[in-house]
Image (cartoon, helix red, strand yellow):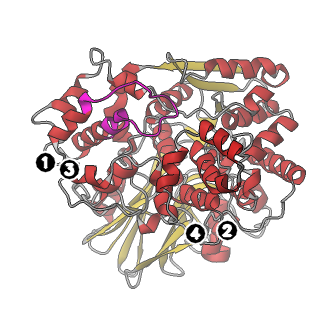
Amino acid sequence: MCGISGMITGSLGGDEVLGRLRSMGCLQRHRGPDDADEMVFESDGRFVGLGFVRLSILDLETGMQPILSVRDGCAIICNGQIYNYLELRDDLTSETFVTRGDIEVALHLYRKTGPDFLNHLNGMYAGAVFDPIRKRVVLFRDRFGIKPLYYTVNSRGFFFSSEIKPLLEGSGTSPELNRDSLPVYFSYRYVPGESTMFVGVRRLPPGSFLVYDLQSGEYSITRYWEYLPGSAGPCTGGEEAEERFMELLLDSVRIRMRSDVEVASLVSGGIDSSSVASIAASARPGLKLFTVSFDDPLYDELDDVRSLMKSEPGIFGGADLFSRTCGPGSLERLPGLLRSVEDCISLGTILPTDQVCELASEHVKVVLTGEGADEIFAGYRKFLLEMAADEIDSMSPGERDLLMGDFPELENYLSTRVPDPAARFIQSELLFSPAELSRLLGIEEKGVPFPADAMPAVTGGMHPLDQLLAMECRSRLPDYVVLRLDKLSMRHSLETRTPYLDYRLAEFAAGLPVRLKVNLAGRMGKYICRRSLLKHGTVDRATAFREKKPFTIPMAAWLLRRDVLPEFVGDVLEGGRGPLNGFLNMNMVRALWNSVTAEGVGPDTLVSEADRVFAILTFGLWTGEFLV
């Protein structure tokens, strides 16, 4: 886990390129506090600069980057880990290796096959290859976009980096708000797709590579992988699927424990992180576990974690559990979090995520996590809601009544449900309506279309649930879930590894029939995961069938405690000269702020007045961090 930066320029000299690379590296040393290096190459009248900051995890002695091929001068920098590098290296016996690590394996695969090398990698990665033979630079990103990669183009050249602040510094660009992103942000709470909140700063899409031609100065982007559930898979029977799921998950955890430093695990009371921690603890006695707790029992899962450990003494007998409490005082962290996240994200999970990453970083450099299971195996309540909406017409009156009782939001969902998967994807979680956005932003009242470059290739023939899963994995997963995990873990120089996002497991999930993902009779998602993990003794029954508890904060209750709120909250939401002036309708902001209530609001509440106020607060703090 590291940070990369680079540039391609025909107008800057070599010394200037080197100086800018060093400045870019300094701004992301939290990603790589152990070492740093830069290289500058010349090709076809352009300078190509590659910079790297290192967090030493694998091949501690010889794994520094950039790595240069002694045969043809190809060079690589890469942020991330290639977990199957040992297996791949066995097929490269004719190559001369100068390191014992994973990234040089990727370099030689590229030299052998070109961009097709990406189809062989199993891992999380974002990097660049300088190819003087083919006169090009190739940028690449892993299938789910677990590792970030930003780029911008101006009169000085083409620039890229793991983070936005170094990108702005290296390209000599002043941060400017991308106003087109505001309606998107205030609809979705993040900005999906290739655009960001900054003018001119774009993301390389997940599962894609960019080829920059050093002769013409032109570039193109190609998608090499896309997650599309609904394809006919090899496993259709329950027992066969249970065995295949466990086989893949075990191997996914196994290869993600390859490290030259200690590997630990984040854990909650849910099945995802608990199963990963259980498998890791079985393989490595004395595993360290890290969790976060809340003083509100509706949100707290610490007792569930302790119960799991007691119920499985043969697995967790030697494990050490570390916990930290997340309370209203955690709001003090918001300005620093937004400075680290850079992309404007307003979901409350950023606070406990940051705290548990900080806790883990005080003990280890690497942790496993459970991210990804809800997205590829349909774990969220909204997926159950979609399945219910699709099947209710085929039910008896009695079954319908029971369903309506278990899903009180279903009646409203059915009354507004539309065929368009993009509209359905956000339907139950839309933060502001078009009319409200018009008032808040002072813009024309119109719908906010889902960004076209964040749309998967869904078809009308796909099951409605699979359509939503494709949407989830193409947008919210890379642009919120793993983005916030990467930025907040690297803020504390911590590497996070996500076994459930192994592409083999994802492709297996894509081929499953929907009935093995969502069991509507039992009112549960991740059905195949629960059955398999219980069958193989990975988790206890209580954990296997525990209802999904959202990883979020008691936001409404916290915002109502004005006596203990940080001073900046009032400055942003009430101040006459605060950072929101000129962007938002302050009368509307103050009215929303005064309408916050905790009545009827809990962990499963999708949208509340508190969520709206938190989105406004987050944007106000973000503007203060980047635009003032």
Q: Nearer the viewer, mark 1 or mark 4?
A: 4
Q: Secondary structure at mark 1?
A: loop
Q: Nearer the viewer, mark 4 or mark 3?
A: 3
Give amino acid for label 2. Answer: Asn
Task: Point out the residue furthest to the right here.
Answer: 239
Residue 591: image location, x then y, percent: 21, 34
Q: Nearer the viewer, mark 2 or mark 1?
A: 1
Residue labelled with disc 4: 458
Q: Mark 3 and mark 2 in contact? Answer it, CB < 8 Å.
A: no
Question: CA gap, disc 2 to disc 4?
Answer: 22 Å
Residue 132: image location, x then y, percent: 50, 77
Q: Nearer the viewer, residue 144 or 297?
A: 297
Question: Magenta segment: does it hold 512?
Answer: no
Residue labelled with disc 1: 582
Residue labelled with disc 3: 439
Q: Which residues are magenta?
A: 593-615
Q: Is residue 579 visible?
A: no
Q: Residue, x 45% and y 58% (percent of image)? A: 149
Q: Secondary structure at mark 3?
A: helix
Q: Are there few (<14), some (14-19), or many (20+) residues within 10 Å of tag 3?
A: some
Question: CA gap, disc 2 to disc 1?
Answer: 47 Å
Q: Residue, x 14% and y 31% (percent of image)? A: 575
Quadrant the C terminus occupies? top left
Mark 2 or mark 1: whose residue is earlier in sequence = 2
Q: Main secondary structure of the magenta part?
A: loop
As drawn, 485 above or below 174: above
Residue labelled with disc 2: 119
Q: Mark 1 and mark 3 in contact? Answer it, CB < 8 Å.
A: no
Q: Nearer the viewer, mark 1 or mark 3?
A: 3
Question: Magenta segment: does it hold 598?
Answer: yes
